[in-house]
Image: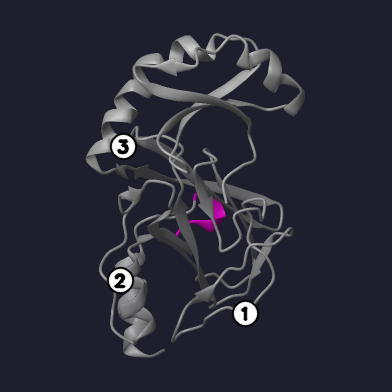
Amino acid sequence: MKPTAITFLVAIALFRCTSALAGSVQIGFVSDAVLDRWKGGKPPAVPSEQTSCTPAKFGESSSCGAVVIFNHSSQPIVLKCTSSSEEFSVGPNRFGEGRFGEGVVGGDDVPLPCLARHVPWHLQPGEGCYVQVTFWPRTGEVQRATIRVTVEQGSRSTTRSLKVEGTSDYPPELRAAEEVRQRHAAELKKIPRVAGVQLDNQDGIKINVIVTDEDDIAAVRRLVPPKIEGYETEVTRYTGSP
C-alpha cells in the first residue's frame, strides 16, 4: 500500500461500524479542498462527523463537501446513503433517491465517486469512494440535516449518522424580504392546502405561497393578501429543487 493511502486510512479512522464490522469500514466528512488534495496525491486532514456548507446564494446551491467511505474489511459491503432533509442532497443526481449506484471506485491511490442511481452501491474490499453533499435552501433560515450511511455486510447492518448545517448568503434587499417572509410564514401556512412560503426573485422580490396541487392555486389565491408589508404575493405549485 502506498504511503498516501496509509496516511489516509490512519487519518480517517474515526467512525467505526459496530459489532462484526468494527474497525473495518471508515466513514466521514471531508471538505472539497481536502478531497481535491487527496485526489492529487496529498494526504488529507482528519475527517469529521459534522460539517457546514458553503453559504448558499439566493436561488443557488452550495457545496457541503463529501462523505468518504472505505471498505477496509475482507468482504464486500453494500451502501445506502440518505438525507433527512430535501434541502440537502447526496450524490451528483439530486433525484437519485439518495442512494449510491453502480460505477467505478478508487483503491489505494485515488477515491472515485459513488454514483447516485436507483440501486445500492457495492464496495469491494480495499475500495473507497465518496459522495458529494449539496445544500439547496428554500428560505434564508439556518437548516440542519442528518446524512445517514447504512453499511450492510451479509446479514449484518449498521448505520452511521453525520450532521450537516447550511446557511444562506443573501444581499441586503433579500435579507429584508426574508425577515418579512419569516414574520408571516406561520400565518400563511395555516391556510388550507398551503405547503410552504418562499421568496421569488424572478421578476422583482415577491412572497411565494406554495401549494402541492395546481387545482388548489385559485382557492388559496383568494385567501392570500395581494401584498404583505409592501411585497407582492403569488401562489404557485411546488415543483421541487432544480
Q: Amino acid at mark 3?
A: Leu
- Tell me where residue 236 appears, x and y as whole percent: 62, 30
Question: Gap between marks 1 and 2, in whole Å?
Answer: 21 Å
Q: Could you tell which of marks 3 and 2 lies nearer the N-terminus?
A: 2
Q: Position of residue 232 (x, y in %)?
A: 45, 24
Callout 2 amino acid = Val
Q: Secondary structure at mark 3?
A: helix
Packing grade of label 3 (10 A; few <14, some 14-19, many >=20) is some
Residue behind mark 1: 104
Where in the figure is residue 224, as x and y percent of width and height? Answer: 54, 13
The residue depicted at 69 percent of the width and 71 percent of the height is 102
User: Mark 1 vs mark 3: which is more N-terminal?
Assistant: 1
> On the image, numbered disc 3 is attached to which residue?
174
| Circle 1 residues within 10 Å: few <14, some 14–19, many ≥20 | some
Q: Residue at x 66, y 75 (%)?
A: 103
N-terminal of the two: label 1 or label 2? 2
Helix, strand or loop status at disc 1: loop
111 up-or-down from 136: above or below: below
Q: Residue at x 43, y 53 (%)?
A: 61
Is 21 drawn above or below residue 171 in the view shown?
A: below
Q: Is residue 71 left or right of residue 154?
A: left
Q: How is the image coloured?
A: one colour
- The extreme right residue here reads 215
Do the CB atoms of the residues marked 1 and 2 lie less than 8 Å apart? no
Give the residue pinned by disc 2.
34
Nearer the observer: mark 3 or 2; the answer is: 3
Q: In the rendered image, is residue 196 in sight? A: yes
Residue 215, above or below 140: above
Closer-to-camera residue (98/135): 135
Region in magenta: 18-23
